[in-house]
Image (cartoon, rainbow, N blue to C red):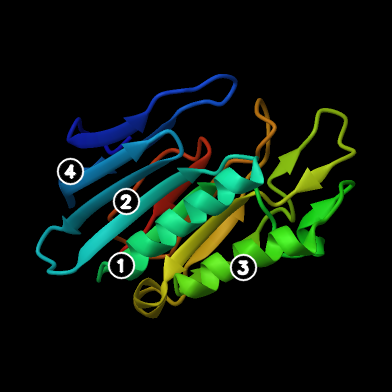
Amino acid sequence: MWGNFNFDYGCSMERGRSGGLVTMWDSNVFVKKRMWCADNYIIIEGKRKNYVEDFYIINVYVPQHQPDKSTLWSFLCDFIVSRPGKVILFGDLNEVRNDSERFGSIFSSGVAAIFNDFIQESDLIDLPMGGRSFTWMNKVGSKMSKLDQFLISDNVNRDNPNLQVVALDRRWSDHNPNINCVNIVSSSFQALPTKESIILDV
């Protein structure tokens, strides 16, 4: 991936029909301090080499059952607001923010409001997405949703004002692979665009 074998990773094993989670990073530029893993998230706390700020890289798969969603939102919000540092949260969030992010299925304004409250209370920014309007589609193309998101803290946004997300072509999965990038020479986090990928200088 990086032209060398200096990488580290954290993983959460698959459960049922849901695939597991994996987060990988280049250990030449990012040093892990702590890691939290559960069925629905991987949180990596670390530092970019030669920088003093802490980073929290949060890879999530949000369950579909609403009470479980709310429990996860509450945990993540408490985690984020209680720790200073830069936050990058991404993954299959299994929720949309408004009716324009869903096609062919019922939109629940109440459920979306809970999701939007989480974003606001965690002081996160939802990065705009290019390439595709939706990141998930059923087999026959009758239902589509933007379920995959990248949320960043304001200090990440200030340092990377040109940050963008691009939904790539979908081939084997029902989700489009996404890549999060900024047009710079050096990069701190890199991965192949298998599902969610990050190429940043933060």
Using the image, determine if residue 12 lies above or below residue 96: above
Can you say which quadrant of the picture contains the C terminus? bottom left
Earlier residue among tags 4 and 3: 4
| Label 1 – label 4 distance at C-alpha | 18 Å
Nearest the viewer among 170 and 47 is 47
For disc 3, the marked residue is: 116
**Residue 24, visible in the rendered structure:** no
Where residue 149 sits, quadrant-wise, is: bottom right
| Label 4 – label 3 distance at C-alpha | 34 Å
Earlier residue among tags 3 and 1: 1
Residue 127, image x, y percentages: 55, 66
Nearest to the eye among marks 3 and 2: give it: 3
Q: Which mark is residue 86?
A: 1
**Residue 194, visible in the rendered structure:** yes
Residue 69, image x, y percentages: 57, 48
Using the image, determine if residue 107 lies above or below residue 158: above
The amino acid beneath tag 2 is Phe
Earlier residue among tags 1 and 2: 1
Q: Which mark is residue 27?
A: 4
Residue 80, image x, y percentages: 35, 64
Nearest the viewer among 147 and 40 is 40
Q: Which mark is residue 189?
A: 2
